[in-house]
Amino acid sequence: MKYIPLVFAGLWRKPTRTIFTFLSVMVAFVLFGILASIESTFAQQVAIARLDRLFVDARFGGPLPIAYQNKIAAIPGVTVVEPTVAIGGYWKDRQNNFAVVMADERYVQARPEYHLTTAQMREIDRSRTGIVIAKKLATRYGWKVGDRIPMTSTLKQMDGSTTWMFDVKVITDNYDFPNAAMFSLGSYKYFDEARAADKGTVNRFLVRISDPGRAAAVGRAIDNLFANSPQPTRTMSEKANAQAGTASIGNITFFTRSIISAVLFMLLFLTGNTMMQSVRERIPEFAVLKTIGFPDSGVLSLVMAEAVTLCVLAGVAGLTLMKFVVPLLVKGMPGNVDTLLQMPWSAAVTGLGFALLTACVAGFFPALRVKRLNVVDALAGR
Amino acid sequence: MGFFGQTGTVTKLGLSTLRNRIGASLVVVIGMACAVGALLSVMSLATGVTSAISHGRPDRALVMSQGAQFEGASTIKRTDLGTIADAPGIAKATNGRPAVSAEVMSNLSVTKKSDGLFTFLQVRGIGPEALSVRPEIHMLQGRMFRPGKFEVIVGKNTPTLYEGTGLGAKLALPQGDWTVVGIFESGGDMLESSVLTDAETLASAMRASAYKSVWVRLQSPAAFATLRQALAANPSLAVELTGESDYLRREGANITTILKAIAYVVGGIMGLGAMFGALNTMYSAVSNRRVEIATLRALGFRGSAVVFSVLAESLGLALLGAVIGAVFAWAAFAGHLQSFGGIAIRLGVTPGMAVGGILFAILLAFVGGIFPAVKAARQPIATAIRAT
């Protein structure tokens, strides 16, 4: 502990050099934080996707008859079948797009993460135009309970109009992904009565099964049921869907890890060089320390401590910026930028680990040089 | 000795001692190489997407139902096809019929060779005059599909990227197995990673009662307005005409914006880190050379010559690093074929991008060099010359 002032004195010997090194390490860890956040968001989406929830879609596109629901429900292991249709459009301006999933009270069991009650979904059905919206969607467009939202879509109603009216009844959140999802739910019954075409059809059945281990088997059973019908199905678990969805935009892990490696590689040279220069300038000083009785391991630890202090402090600064300041900067940005850049604490810990590792590798050779220093030669300036 | 002569001498002197500062100089080279390499690598993805969607022809357009933003949301009644084909401004095929192709879409789930996961490929049913609407389609292997048979042709990138889609393969499409009878190229556009077949055969297999869109080749790019007005003026049609280039841009604008933003954020932050590294290196360089620089100043060399020589060293190191980074990105990614959201894109590192990356590094090196350079030129000669 008593050597702490000595460590800081060593670092502060050339303030400009230390500050610039500190700043590069700091920005590097901001970048690390950004990449780690992106990677963890996608990984989390796959991790959280359930094996016991299946998506039944039309194999070749187009709508599926709602009558399929009874046949699917009769398959052993199926606990809930929820028909859904999504309708997309915009509010006031083409930029303000949103989609409403038309469903019924079975949605409560189909997606328990939304913490809805059967009573709420019945109220949606009863009011016909009522919708449940995600907190994030409500915040984005400033909608409150009781607001009437017109949606301009391309989908025609019986009277020829393409504007659908919705009334906000409930604002809720996805408790697995707080503040992330932008969902909204309406009444399938109302929608199916009002629409002009494709009555009695759905886009997707959400199916819950009792045994996640039988996801593939139940999926095959469903697909076999309709294989020879005019509208065959394609069933997959939410997890398989999430994996493919994440992979379709490229190999994210490969991408983020390559860049993180490039950043760490750059840092290693940068801090290594700083430590090397700093040590070279102070050779006579270390010789003096050794002369007055510092052991070889003592001076070695001193140099290592300097490297660790510099890297870890800069790493902490960068990760703190990422954790607390960056979310404020990207607040309100379009898309899901703000959810993508929520750095989990686990990533911060990994980041600190990398800072420590960089310090150890970068400080090792300069420290070794000081350890092996010959006092007589060094003092003589040889 | 003139200004340039002086600068040259000071620079040469600096370079001759560079060997002693090799470690520190490497920091600039490696920093810039990493920053430029990362910037160009991410940009290569954006370039790939841009080039996949940049094949729009000014004399080609598509008719979709009013308000539809993309083909999937559009419906064109079968009975409207004749009216659309007879509208003015549409070119004639060699057989004298209007160059129109009423199209329907389905999708095929395929397994990617790269990671074994599935993705969806577009299966497009095209009309009998489709080849005069899309003259860039040429058969490479096999033959054209025959209408009425369950036959398809696939783009040349399809078999490269996806399992079981080569010549002779059976694809699970509506109502059973469809045979791949040919492989085509299409001038590098998105169709090269899709599947084509006859529109009527596909529509009847899907029991689709309407088309999704009608593609047309115009007599000339100028005929676009004529056709657009004619279609809008017809009260029996509720359709809109969109130019192909506009349509593709709309499809790809979001994703290229996102990719470019990622490239700039990643490259920008790494560049910032590299710049601090350059500042460090150049400060230590002028500090090492202070006796030598003070001596030159005492001999009558101008301060500006010192500034330029220090800058030249910083820029030279950065240039070397940037070139290494650009070459790395080019060697690792350029020309690489990748499946991206169901379309095949060819990653690209263009000379323009490389120049941009190099200029970026030079800008950073300028900032990283100018402050140490000025400091070197301003140091009091008398004290500096005695320093040890």
Image (cartoon, grey):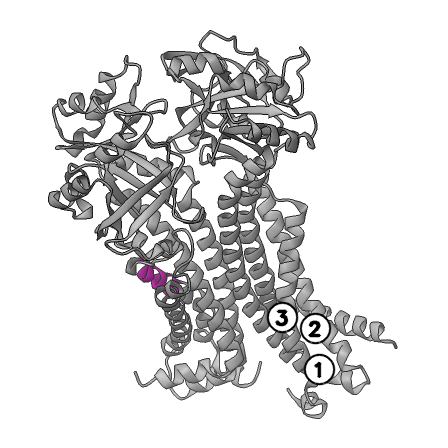
Q: Which residue is mark 3?
A: B367
Residue on which disc 1 sits: B377
Which one is in front, A352 or B268?
B268
Q: Position of residue A173 (x, y in %)?
A: 23, 52
Identify the subunit bearing mark 1. B
Question: Are there few (<14), some (14-19), or many (20+) residues within 10 Å of tag 3?
Answer: some
Does residue B347 appear in this view?
no
- Are discs 2 and 3 both within one chain? yes
How far apart are the two marked residues, 2 and 1, measured between alpha carbons?
9 Å
In the shown orientation, is residue A102 left or right of residue B77? left
On screen, B260 above or below B168?
A: below
Give the CA separation, mark 3 to mark 1. 16 Å
Span colored in magenta: A347-357
Q: Marks 2 and 1: CB-CB under 8 Å?
A: yes
Name the residue beneath numbered marker 2: B310
Q: Chain of mark 3?
A: B
Task: Classify 10 Å Cα crowding around label 2: few (below 14), some (14-19), many (20 and above).
Answer: many
Is residue B200 left or right of B24 when viewed as pictured? Answer: left
Q: Amino acid type of disc 1?
A: Ala
Question: Considering depth in this image, is A68 or A253 the residue closer to the camera?
Answer: A68
* Quadrant including the N terminus of chain B: bottom right
Q: Quarter of the image holding residue B169?
A: top left
Residue at image position (70%, 32%) is B222
Amino acid carrying mark 3 in the image:
Val
Question: In the rendering, at what x and y percent does residue B83 appear?
Answer: 55, 19
- Front residue of B14/A217: it is A217
Which of the 4 image quadrants contains residue B234? top right
Q: Earlier in the sequence, mark 2 or mark 1?
A: 2
Image location (x, y in percent) of residue B346: 56, 36
First-in-chain label (2 vs 3): 2
At x 53%, y 35%, the residue is B345
